[in-house]
Amino acid sequence: MNGLSVDKQVARLTSEQKQQFADWGYISSLPVFDDSGADYLQLRFGELVDLLPSEIDISRVNNWHKANRWIYELCHTPVILDYVQDLLGPKFFHWGASFFCKYPGDKTEVPWHQDAQYWPLHPHKAVTVWLAFFDADETNGAMRVVRGSHHLGEVAHQEVQGEHFMLAQQVVASAIDPHDAVSLCLRAGQISLHDDAIIHGSLANRSDRMRAGLTLRYSATDSKCDLAVWPTFESYLARGVDQYQLNPVGKVPRDEGFPSRPQQQSSEFS
């Protein structure tokens, strides 16, 4: 991709890293793009923000891959797909791309939650890639995970109130062992990978620096979405052959558009 040079340290996942994902539910600090590639990510981020009308919060819309050709191609970067393949196997599709951003001093928090409770996908065979556009650390609100919590199954959630929360529900406190909470600190251009059942969240940005990342969602081809619950769900084959053909296939965008609300269909974009 133009402007996005790959880090020379890129390598396939080791057996130890795969075992960590199985045991702990995440892998962090994987190299993808080098310093010049990270600079380009930040340039493009500014351009994407400028596309949006002032009333649209970039963190409150999703499915950028349906609206924007550059984001679509970013989600299909071979290096990223190699990492995902090492976890999901040779046949999987891409279905999500959302920004999670915290500007300097942003008080927004993402409460502890499990992604799987929001996704009517069965079986649950999903991997999320969190691509850092800017450095993420504990002072500017890096994502935190509860190590090994994906083994707990579906955990009870309760309502949470407050405008500073990005989600309306959070995992009940009794399900979380604070000693198992880990911050996934990333340099711009790096990624983390996490299981869809791991408990995770993030705190406010207490720094004067930007924190922004793009989440990329992938599932194995034998995973089916319940369209009665999620009628706008669409898949984009990323690797291999989809012999099951269980999900609607989305239209690949041609232009650099933007989503204007959550859960739009690809037919709404050119």
Image: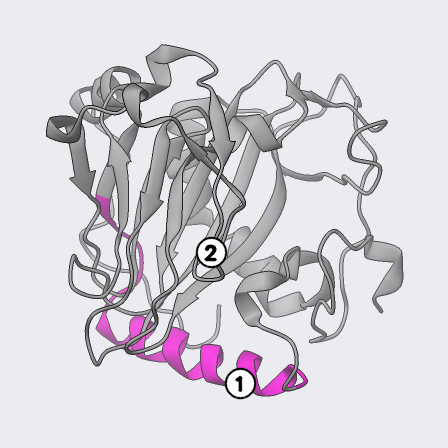
**Is residue 135 shown left or right of residue 133?**
left
Q: Could you tell me which residue is drawn at 56 percent across and 79 percent down? A: 48
Q: Is residue 38 magenta?
A: yes
> How many numbered callouts?
2
Q: Could you tell me which residue is drawn at 80 percent across and 46 percent down? A: 250
Identity of the residue furthest to the right in this view? 267
Which sits earlier in the primary sequence, circle 2 or circle 1?
A: 1
Quarter location, residue 173: top left
Q: Secondary structure at mark 2?
A: loop
Q: Is residue 30 above or below residue 101?
A: above
Q: Could you tell me which residue is drawn at 22 percent across and 26 percent down? A: 147
The disc labelled 2 sits on which kind of residue? Gly
Q: Is residue 155 above or below residue 268?
A: above
- At which x and y percent is residue 177? 19, 24
Q: Which residues are magenta?
A: 29-53
Q: Is residue 52 magenta?
A: yes
Q: Residues within 10 Å of mark 1 (few under 14, many from 20)?
A: few
- Observer-nearest of 194 and 86: 194
- At which x and y percent is residue 5? 34, 68
Q: Could you tell me which residue is drawn at 31 percent across and 55 percent down? A: 32
Tag nearer the camera, 2 or 1: 2
Numbered label attached to residue 47? 1
Q: CA distance from mark 2 to mark 1?
A: 30 Å
The quadrant of the picture occupied by the C terminus is bottom right
Q: Is residue 188 above or below residue 80?
A: below
The residue singled out by tag 2 in the image is 162
